Image: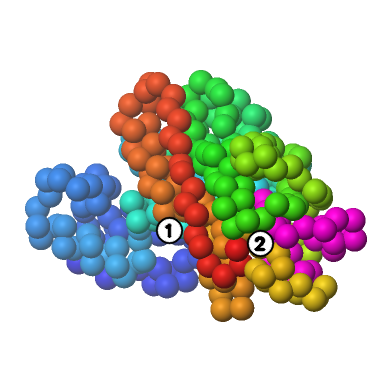
């Protein structure tokens, strides 16, 4: 092998295949073959090339390889504002799942113009797919991806569009289970802490809960909307305590339910003797000692599995018909019902 030229240790830019070829004393095409699985190359040459690459810190440019038809393995994940712990836990699990199958997520968070600009920039790269975890600018993203033939997988809000696969929890049915649980517990004066109207799940969970109450001949004695944060759940429950007597409360997510527990205990209420509390999502905090929240599990593992399955299907057949995969919630009984 040739000795490295004196200026190699001073190089500030990324080492190239040409640099490796020069040091190893081979052609540029030989370097390419050395890093191409299955490509023929003399073993002695391969060893020289790999040694030179190691000395230079060289790695093949994966984006350049896409020009030859290879997959980039880049997957964009639009996570939105991630207002609560469930969004963060679900996004983290999705990232880990993608990593496990050799995909490299590019995560975009936030909303508004900043998010739009980030999406516009990331679409300049050869993405294998776009995964939508938030619906705030979903329609715009879908339109852009359609023009670029980038598969879209929506996990959360249903998006009716060509080339979009949907992974969606049956929120209506899940919330009805919460009503059944409270009614079976003997609760007859029931309140609701709902979510903000700009979230698709908010309306689905509210209507499902009301339908569930109706099956038992019950109606709400009070209702207040939060914004899926713990603070908003505390504030909403305080307002409900001022205007209604209730012995059961359903909160549209766990963060607000944990806030509700705080407000009820500060008001001298015993949980669950005086008031039953049911949440939604089953975030990690819901399992903590001192919380032990009864809730409906929004299954993160099932969501990740469904997204990865949809991604495989789309990459194998880009023209496959659109598919919707329903997810089912599970009642998790703890100490607050």
Residue 121, image quadrant: top right
Mark 2 or 1, closer to the camera? 2
Q: Nearer the viewer, residue 318 or 60?
A: 318
Q: Residue at x 37, y 31 (%)?
A: 314
> What residue is shown with label 2?
277
> What residue is shown with label 1?
96
As drawn, 268 above or below 63: below
Decide if residue 26 is on the left or right side of residue 156. left
Q: Position of residue 77 (x, y in %)?
A: 54, 46
Residue 122, image quadrant: top right
Q: Position of residue 311 (x, y in %)?
A: 39, 38
Residue with the most extreme right position: 242
Q: Residue at x 57, y 32 (%)?
A: 158
Q: Position of residue 280 (x, y in %)?
A: 60, 54
Q: Residue at x 27, y 55 (%)?
A: 21
Is 149 part of what is drawn in magenta?
no
- Measure how far apart labels 2 and 1 are at the Cα level: 32 Å
Badge number at residue 208 = none
Count residues near mark 1 (Cα–Cα under 10 Å), then give few for <14, some for 14-19, many for 20+: some
The answer to whether one can see residue 195 in this image is: yes
Which segment is the magenta one?
A: 236-264
């Amino acid at each position: 092998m040739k000795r490295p030229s004196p200026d190699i240790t001073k190089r500030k830019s990324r080492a190239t295949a040409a640099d490796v070829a020069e040091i190893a004393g081979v052609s540029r095409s030989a370097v390419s073959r050395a890093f191409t699985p299955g490509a023929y190359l003399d073993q002695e040459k391969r060893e020289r090339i790999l040694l030179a690459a190691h000395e230079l810190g060289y790695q093949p440019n994966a984006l350049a390889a896409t020009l030859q038809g290879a997959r980039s393995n880049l997957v964009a994940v639009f996570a939105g504002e991630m207002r609560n712990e469930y969004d963060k836990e679900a996004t983290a699990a999705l990232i880990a799942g993608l990593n496990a199958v050799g995909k490299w997520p590019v995560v975009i968070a936030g909303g508004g113009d900043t998010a739009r600009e980030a999406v516009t920039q990331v679409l300049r790269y050869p993405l294998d797919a776009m995964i939508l975890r938030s619906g705030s600018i979903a329609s715009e993203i879908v339109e852009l991806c359609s023009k670029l033939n980038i598969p879209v997988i929506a996990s959360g809000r249903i998006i009716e569009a060509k080339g979009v696969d949907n992974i969606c929890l049956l929120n209506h049915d899940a919330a009805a289970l919460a009503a059944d649980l409270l009614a079976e517990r003997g609760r007859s004066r029931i309140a609701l802490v709902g979510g903000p109207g700009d979230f698709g799940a908010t309306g689905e969970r509210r209507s499902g809960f009301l339908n569930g109450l109706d099956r038992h001949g019950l109606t709400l004695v009070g209702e207040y909307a939060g914004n899926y944060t713990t603070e908003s759940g505390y504030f909403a429950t305080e307002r409900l305590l001022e205007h209604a007597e209730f012995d059961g409360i359903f909160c549209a997510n766990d963060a607000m339910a944990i806030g509700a527990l705080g407000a009820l205990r500060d008001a001298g209420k015993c949980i669950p003797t005086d008031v039953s509390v049911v949440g939604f999502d089953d975030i990690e905090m819901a399992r903590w000692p001192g919380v032990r929240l009864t809730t409906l599990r929004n299954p993160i593992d099932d969501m990740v599995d469904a997204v990865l399955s949809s991604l495989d299907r789309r990459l194998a057949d880009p023209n496959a018909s659109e598919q919707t995969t329903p997810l089912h919630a599970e009642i998790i009984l703890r100490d607050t019902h």
